[in-house]
Amino acid sequence: MADAVESGGRARLVSELGRVQDLVRQLELQLRAPADAASVDLCRRLVHQIVALTDRSIGMLHSSPDLGPSPLSATGTGSPISSDAASDHHPFRPATASPKKRKATARWTSQQVRVSAAGGGAEGPADDGHSWRKYGQKDILGAKHPRAYYRCTHRNSQNCPATKQVQRTDDHPALFDVVYHGEHICRPGGGSGSAKWAQQQHNPHAQAALQGLSARLTVATTTTADAAAIGAAAALPPMTPESCPVRGASSPWSLASPVGSDSNGCLHQGVSPCPVPGYRDWASDLQEVVSSAFAAVSSAAPLPVLDDEFMSLECFGFDQNFEIDTAMPSLYYP
DNA sequence: ATAATTTGACCTGA
DNA sequence: TCAGGTCAAATTAT
């Protein structure tokens, strides 16, 4: 029985990567075409798809010991997240699954990512598009660095429940492990807000996926060969200001960067194309990497069963019938 | 003046 | 009892 499920899991991963490959090809085609409003919009949708699928695929690998330890649990150097805490806060498992502490009854959405310090700075990870207010710091047993606790700035004004925890990794001081809890319900601007914003707000998984993947755009991870191939697909090449001069962004979150800001300073994320020559080359590289990842996973050892909780709670659905020419939604909440 | 951060105390679950 | 998470007063920054 296990074999059937395992091969099913692997087939699922291969299928996901195959779709990523297709999407990247479409993206590359679009990027080679003259940029107009329609193609820009199409690129935006494609990037959305790629972001979601790669994040999901990486999640599968993280939960797959047979494909090697996950980047967040492979360091073995005593990092609280890489060792003890990894079992408490699985990167793609809600906090409710944790045997630890508070919030045991709350149905938090949770997403853990590892991000680099902004611009190589030492203060903390890059801006993730939301405004946060620090409300605590705690020394964690066995960790070299304290953990900082942040809540959404709009917690009081809009009852936004989103929180995050940031902790510098033991082994790579330039890297931070960030765990997001809850979803933002704070609204941008005083108006009714865009439908796109509303949709995203109602899909915390998509939100988390965007944050997760965009974080990994500059993430340095330690991976096994297979995971490295996948990780590379997500991590290559960092969208620095140099590679994306149009945006001139200083944040490594460029690919899934904030596209709007309201008077409250509550940013909402979106995906912006970067229609410059360098970006087109980057798309080619991405396709190449995805292809190699696809090949690597296709020949990988059988993927062990993904636990039901992971599949039911942490995998947002993906519209298999998605067509590029149809309206936006392709991520949906199962 | 207001907002954000710091930090010790307190609370909660294991 | 302990460790992680949160509160809230004091402090600092804007």
Image: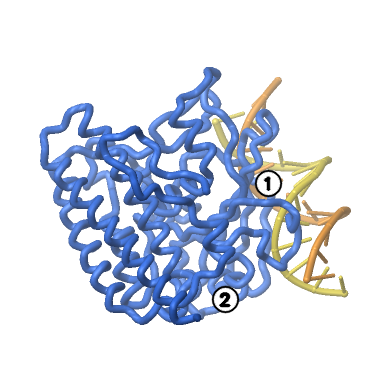
Chain colours: A blue, B orange, C yellow
* For residue B3, side relative to residue A280 (left or right): right
The residue located at (34%, 65%) in the rendering is A231
Q: Is residue A28 visible?
A: yes
Q: Secondary structure at mark 1?
A: strand
Give the alpha-carbon distance from disc 1 to disc 2, as whole Å.
26 Å
Please tell me the numbered disc located at residue A83: 2
The residue located at (62%, 55%) in the rendering is A148
Q: Secondary structure at mark 2?
A: loop
* For residue A249, side relative to residue A150 (left or right): left
Nearer to the camera, A229 or A56: A56
Mark closer to the observer (1, 2): 2
Mark 1 and mark 2 residues within 8 Å of each other at the beta carbon: no
Q: Chain of mark 2?
A: A
Find residue A53 and report its horizontal and vertical position in percent. Answer: 37, 55
Mark 1 nearby-residue class (10 Å; few <14, some 14–19, many ≥20): few
N-term-proximal mark, 1 vs 2: 2
Mark 1 = which residue? Answer: A135
Q: State how many labels appear.
A: 2
Q: Of the residues shown, which amino acid type is indicated by label 2?
A: Ser
Find residue A252 and report its horizontal and vertical position in percent. Answer: 36, 49
* Whether labels 1 and 2 share one chain: yes
Find residue A308 and report its horizontal and vertical position in percent. Answer: 56, 66
Find residue A87 and report its horizontal and vertical position in percent. Answer: 61, 72
* For residue A176, side relative to residue A217 (left or right): right
Q: Quadrant of residue A111?
A: bottom right
Nearer to the camera, A146 or A91: A91
The residue located at (36%, 57%) in the rendering is A54
